[in-house]
Amino acid sequence: MEAIKMHQAECDKYRQKIIEQGLDGPWFTEPDRVEFKNLGYDCLLSRSPFSFAWCGYVAVPKGHSAFGLHYDHADLEDIRVPGGLTYSKECHEHICHEADEHSDPVWWLGFDCAHCYDVTPGSEASLKAITGEIRKCPADYEVTYKDMNYVREQVLSLATQLKLLEEIKAKLKPTSIIGEVYPITVLKNIFEQLGITTYVFSYLDPADGCPITESRGVPEDVKYIREGISEDLKEVK
């Protein structure tokens, strides 16, 4: 797809500027685009060329309650991603599927990691080229680079929230969430936001491998299992 090639060319151009300014970091060993599927949704990690910060996106299909909604719509106000949702659009330029240009319509919802508390190497390189200095923050002001793994986890969380939102809107019990790695605390927060009061988590303690069970409400209603810290989240039949 031509737009994706052009986006990669822009990333390569700004990567060279970062190299020229001597700003080393994990951004040199990461790709600039990652596509995958989760819960039936197309998911995308894409680097912004100018800031060189990651952005994360999930595409919902036509018929989903979030399809066509602006990112600040009231129905999406409980969605939790870093900095809040900042993107909503149909396939446009490089924010689209890589392969099939004739796939069914989708609506991309996304966020960016180029906020005041984020390290943005591209922006820092541009500032240094002009002023000779990089951004200075107060000592108590924590600014970090949100790497690919961090953003991938946030995209997985966004997909989960959108899946649960759709099932709640459809008045279905949320029994079909099968994802990858989700912190239990994240799922608890999502369930609380969506008014889900019945669940049971069974997983292995990453410290010693012993089984742990946490439940709320009627355990037979919705059951999940998380096997180990790096295993898939799987529904228990």
Image (spheres, grey):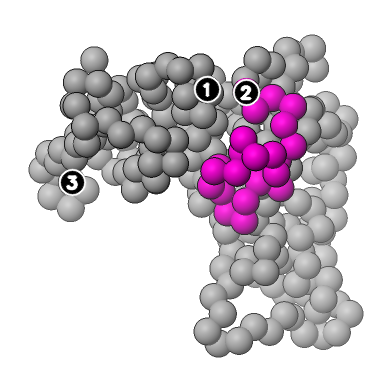
Lower position in the chain sequence, tag 1 or tag 3: 1
Q: Residue 67: x, y in percent?
A: 69, 24
Q: Residue 140: x, y in percent?
A: 52, 84
Question: Can residue 180 be found in the magenta stretch?
Answer: no
Lower position in the chain sequence, tag 1 or tag 2: 2
- Residue type indicated by callout 3: Asp
- Residue type indicated by callout 1: Lys
Report the Cα–Cα distance between label 3 and label 2.
36 Å
Which of discs 3 and 2 lies nearer the camera? The answer is 2
Q: Nearer the viewer, residue 226 or 134?
A: 226
- Residue type indicated by callout 2: Ser
Q: Nearer the viewer, residue 170 or 153?
A: 170
Q: What residue does disc 2 label?
A: 65
- Judged left or right of residue 103, residue 226 is left
Q: Which residues are magenta?
A: 65-86
Lower position in the chain sequence, tag 3 or tag 2: 2
Residue drawn at (48%, 21%) of the image: 167
Quarter of the view holding residue 221: top left
Q: Nearer the viewer, residue 102 or 27?
A: 102
Above or below, comparing residue 37 to residue 226 in the picture: above
**Type of secondary structure dominating the magenta stretch:** loop
Q: What residue does disc 1 label?
A: 169
> Circle 1: is it few (<14), some (14-19), or many (20+) Cα within 10 Å?
few
- Judged left or right of residue 73, residue 140 is left
Above or below, comparing residue 88 to residue 126 in the picture: above
Question: Can residue 78 be found in the magenta stretch?
Answer: yes
Q: What residue does disc 3 label?
A: 205
